[in-house]
Image (cartoon, rainbow, N blue to C red):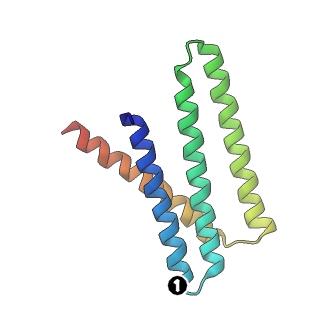
């Protein structure tokens, strides 16, 4: 496995661990609805990251116009998918918004923190 693929895989594993740990902790505190919302936030964040990595991987296409079109289509698809999931979660299923945002935010922070840690370690 090459370095970028390893980085992506380790980032996803860390983010899954955060989502699972948060969901389990909220279940143990007797907040099953919050656990579902937190876990859904983490899953949305993971899915978004996965789609971004796929889009970036396709930017190596020799045809720059096609790569640019693919990037725009992918971005629009990601925003639409995330928007639909979040609206369904909050409006239809009535999940706790704060727990959902906490899952999104903490997962993103763990991914960014891992990226910064790895970048600092690679430059030394």
Q: Is residue 51 above or below residue 26?
A: above
Q: Is residue 7 above or below residue 95?
A: above
| The C terminus, quarter of image | top left
- Which residue appears at 60% of the width and 41% of the height? 51
Give percent across and percent down for residue 8: 45, 43
Residue 59: image quadrant is top right
Residue lying farthest to the right in this orientation? 92
Give percent across and percent down for residue 107: 49, 58
Give percent across and percent down for residue 36: 64, 71
| The N terminus, quarter of image | top left
- Which residue appears at 61% of the width and 20% of the height? 67
Residue lying farthest to the front in this orientation? 1
Apparent side of residue 13 relative to residue 43 in the rendered image (left or right): left
Residue lying farthest to the left in this orientation? 124
Front residue of 92/39: it is: 39
- Which residue appears at 45% of the width and 46% of the height? 9
Which residue is labeled 1 in the image?
A: 28
Q: Secondary structure at mark 1?
A: helix
Residue 71: image quadrant is top right
């Amino acid at each position: 496995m090459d370095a970028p693929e390893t980085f992506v895989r380790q980032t996803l594993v860390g983010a899954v661990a955060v989502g699972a740990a948060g969901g389990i902790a909220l279940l143990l505190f007797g907040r099953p609805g919050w656990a579902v919302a937190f876990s859904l936030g983490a899953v949305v964040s993971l899915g978004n990251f996965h789609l971004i990595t796929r889009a970036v991987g396709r930017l190596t296409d020799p045809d720059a116009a096609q790569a640019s079109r693919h990037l725009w289509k992918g971005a629009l698809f990601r925003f639409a998918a995330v928007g639909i999931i979040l609206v369904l979660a909050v409006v239809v299923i009535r999940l706790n918004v704060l727990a959902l945002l906490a899952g999104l935010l903490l997962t993103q922070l763990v991914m960014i923190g891992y990226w910064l840690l790895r970048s600092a370690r690679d430059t030394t």
